Amino acid sequence: MRKYFFRVCLTVIFIVLLWVIHYAWISFPIISGYNAKQMCTCVFVSGRDPKDIDTSDLGWFPLNIATNKVNFQDSSVTSAVWGFATKKAVYRKRIGCTLINDINEKQLRLQSFEIPEPPHQNSDTIGWPAGDKIVDTFPSTINKNKLDAAVSNAFTEPYPGKKQRTRAVIILYSGQIIAEKYAPGLNKNTKMYGWSMAKSFTAALIGVLVQQGKLNVMQPAPVAEWSNLKDPRHSITVENLLQQTSGLDFKEDYTKASDVTNMLYKKDDMAAYAASHSLAHEPGTQFNYSSGNSNILSHIIRQVVGEKEYASFPFTSLFYKIGMYHTSFEPDASATYVGSSYINATARDYARFGLLYYNDGIWNGERILPVNWIKQTQTSSSANTLKNYGYQFWLNGFDKKNPSQKAFPDVPSDMFYCDGFAYENIYIIPSKKLVVVRLGLTLDHSFDENAFLKNIIESIQ
């Protein structure tokens, strides 16, 4: 009996040990990769204190089991989990941070990115939105007390044991800034992560190419891996990718090692990795939110624009045209912008992007996005039963937990929005003349988006 019990114990210990080794093998590189990339961007792009990042952005399990070392001499961050799975991210001026994967550091640093300098001007002397000078007048149709209360509420911590951690709020009414507030240590010049809001920017760049006559979203996506007419993926259109109905068998799960975490933290060429996936469904028949689709779109932009112009394209064709002079778009190790996740900008630059969509894709009299592009952005595919997603923008469709009601029951149906991890959002509500930016680090879902927007709307008399 003792021998049997002993053998059972050894077997259990062996199984547990194998599980731990397996978990460490697949998960530690993701943890250290996330830490290295996050710390690098927050320090060298946003200019924040590494100690603050360690305790806030990276202070939750399992991220806090990694150790992060910032090297200010070569502008890099190295992270490891208990000495294992070391990952390194390097910062390059005006390019941002890139995680080293499947490439050596010397090769990465030799990559050439020709990004034009933004105009040298004192933006504080130039009126909004071209610059940062804000007018003193206030709309008579807004109850300022109610508006100020709505903004202040967003920065409170009303729930014991939970943390909303709002970092910035900007509210535009008819294009005018009527409210703006930042958490301590941050201001209008601080670049902040947008995470999956990057998807909406990628869609806008696709729109620019459509406006220029270089791309047709109804045609098969120009992806080399799918070029064979016999490949069932050949029928995937650019619109399928925009609407997240490509049919690719891609798992978007951030709680464990999955396609998306492997792509972001283990792969040099994220678009190629995503494009290598087989079909799970016929294109256009199933909605499946996927960062892989967005990175494939980003590589399509690179292919259509060409290598010579690609690095500068987001800046010359979109960012600088609408006054987004404080925005960075970070590439992967293959030099393709990570169109799913790595956008960094000031709150005001995010507001400018929202304003472009509020103004039907027109800026200062120039049509940047095609006619009907915004309407298409606000339209869900027939495959999406909740009707909550358009062209890489979320819509006020039906609630996932309660499909009989709207996701935002107290917000007009015409709202559409960019949505990033931890409630980074740009909300556009045309019927209320509103563009609302909220940036933060809410990990526990304690930020009530519906109540926040409801309170703002109620300030309109």
Image (spheres, grey):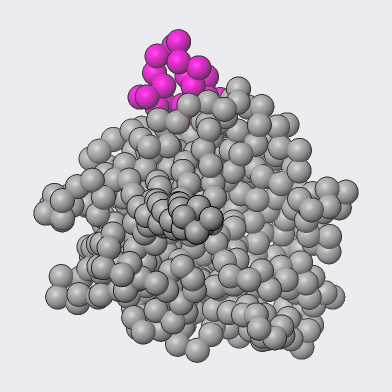
Residue 252 in view, yes or no: yes
Identify the residue at image location x=82%, y=74%: 458
Give whichever of 94, 210 is nearer the camera. 94
Q: Main secondary structure of the magenta part?
A: loop
- Magenta-drawn segment: 214-236
**Image position of 153 with respect to 117: above or below:** below
For the residue pair 157 and 93, the one nearer the viewer reads as 157
Picture residue at 26% right of the left edge, 50% below the top: 101
Q: Position of residue 100 (x, y in %)?
A: 24, 54
Residue 186 or residue 270, whichever sits in front:
270
Residue occupying image coordinates x 39% and y 62%: 31
How many numbered discs sit on the rendered protein?
Answer: 0
Quarter of the image that includes the C terminus:
bottom right
Q: Is residue 230 magenta?
A: yes
**Picture coordinates of residue 43, whole percent (x, y):** 32, 75
Q: Position of residue 202 (x, y in %)?
A: 47, 47
Q: Where residue 364 appears, x then y in whole percent?
A: 52, 57
Q: Residue at x 72, y 55 (%)?
A: 415
